[in-house]
Image (cartoon, grey):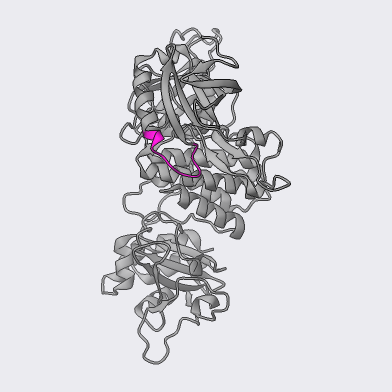
Amino acid sequence: MNIGPGTVIGGYRIERVLGAGGMGKVFLAKHPSLPRFDALKVLGTEVSNDREYRGRFEREANLAAALDHPNIVAVYNRGEDHGQLWIAMQYVDGTDASAALTEFPQGMTPERALRITTEVGRGLDHAHRRGLLHRDVKPANFMLSLGGGDEGCINEERVLLADFGLAKSTEDTLELTQTGTFLATIAYAAPEQLSGQRLDHHTDIYSLACSFYKLVTARNPYPGAQPALVMAGHLYEPPPRITAVRPDLPTAVDDVLAVAMAKNPRERFDSCHEFTSALERALHHGESVVTVRTRPGAAAPEPPTARQEFIDPTLPPAESTTADPKTPARKRLWLATGAVAVTVTLAVGGGLWAVRDHTPDAVASPTTTTTASVAAPKSVAEARHQNPAFLGKTIAAVDVTGENGYRPEVAIHLQPSPQATFFEALGFTYHHGCTRVDDEPTPRPLAATYNPSDVGVLNQIDSGYLLAVRSDTNSGKGSMVHLPETITLRKATVLVLDDPIAVDALRNWTDGSEQILLEKLVPILRKSVK
């Protein structure tokens, strides 16, 4: 069916083409009865005739139509005309972030990129709370309306996330269709998407972090001329350091992106709000969210036990893995992976890429060097001897409890107390401002909200180390996410202890507390105190 100006589809009269993609075209179309223009996405005949896709399209378009949020492009209607599926959406008079980025070869300002990312994150969190994933978060889907001021001020531009018509329910958690079609853009795809694993809201958070990286640097997080190289980056390379491209940014931004782009979805932020809030604090205050992870069960990645080969199916198969050296070797990318054999076919950029795991009879030892773990000291004296960096360093400990990370209860441990005595036995100097007044109980409750005019004890802790002992509802990830600003705005280095056993041992001192803290707290101090 030839579609052009004047063509009527589902009652909508086509005005002009707005854009085109791999699945169809988007047109500006006049509404059948209302005095407005909508964006009409018409899917190609091949896609429309795919029985599996038709069912997915109808089910998920219905779910997306129920979303009502100022940062999400609204889905109005859907249907079929002359064998082609169509979906009517809100028309945004403006551009998209990918097109806007072409005007900034070195990247947007961090402030504008943060604002765009934050607005998109609000829309995503809204969808996630209603059981929908987007699964194709990328700058090309970030719609930017024209500024409302006389000069089209950027601060007044509106940000909306488009293409929720292709969203999916969180109950449908596999990314590959039965026919093998891949539904994301690999430049921003999370590792679990590329490997065909189950998805959840952390997948969209990963893609949002990749999008922020692109907006600020004008580069993809894992650049590569071949899809296999890009996929390899997402699957196996560490998160890129944005400061390597933008050295003007605080290094804390690297830490935030490292969490948001963690290979393991469970190690990422739990919401877009957490991610963008941490990003804002990193950009504006240089505050890092990364500390030693003490959450039970947060084990280090297992060493590689197999190899993975990304194969271009347009090339002839290799005769064997031990080919004659005289025979030209086909280019291969060997990557470390798990030992479970799996084959996944992805339709990317019009070509198929096969991902195959091979478990060889013998696997070479990894070439990376690891540091031998230090056995837990058997006594405080031994811990002090092993860690001369502790000597003379100032430290204080503060409890963080409560039902909400934004309004927690905060209390500072005072001296004299068993807690202060323990730190001093390790070689630290407990902060002189944290001293009991008369028969005052410890810990002393404090205000959780930062007040520059407050001359309280925490305002005196602007050097040394401050240990946040967390059991609030946002604890458990070994990070400073949602810590109250009265703690995070300190100039002292903030450390986090949130292992439940260690937290209880420090707060409720018993004869067994010392040994528990030697095993669980001293490693945190050893890694962080310099």
Predominant SS of the magenta segment: loop
Q: Which of these two is toward me, 230 or 302?
A: 230
Position in image of residue 99 (x %, y %): 64, 32
Q: Which of these two is toward me, 13 or 380?
A: 13
Q: Residue at left 68%, top 50%?
A: 248
Q: Which of these two is toward me, 177 or 217?
A: 177
Position in image of residue 291 (x %, y %): 46, 56
Q: Which of these two is toward me, 212 or 72?
A: 72
Which segment is the magenta one? 63-73
Residue 529 visible? The answer is yes
Position in image of residue 15 (x %, y %): 60, 22
Q: Residue at left 55%, top 13%?
A: 3
Residue 239 visible? The answer is no
Position in image of residue 42 (x %, y %): 49, 20
Residue 72 covered by magenta stretch: yes
Q: Is residue 191 above or below residue 400?
A: above
Q: Residue at left 38%, top 58%?
A: 474
Residue lying furthest bottom: 438
Q: Is residue 170 above or below residue 508?
A: above
Residue 290 covered by magenta stretch: no
- Residue 319 is drawn in which quadrant? top left
Q: Is residue 294 above or below residue 448?
A: above
Q: Is residue 400 above or below residue 362?
A: below
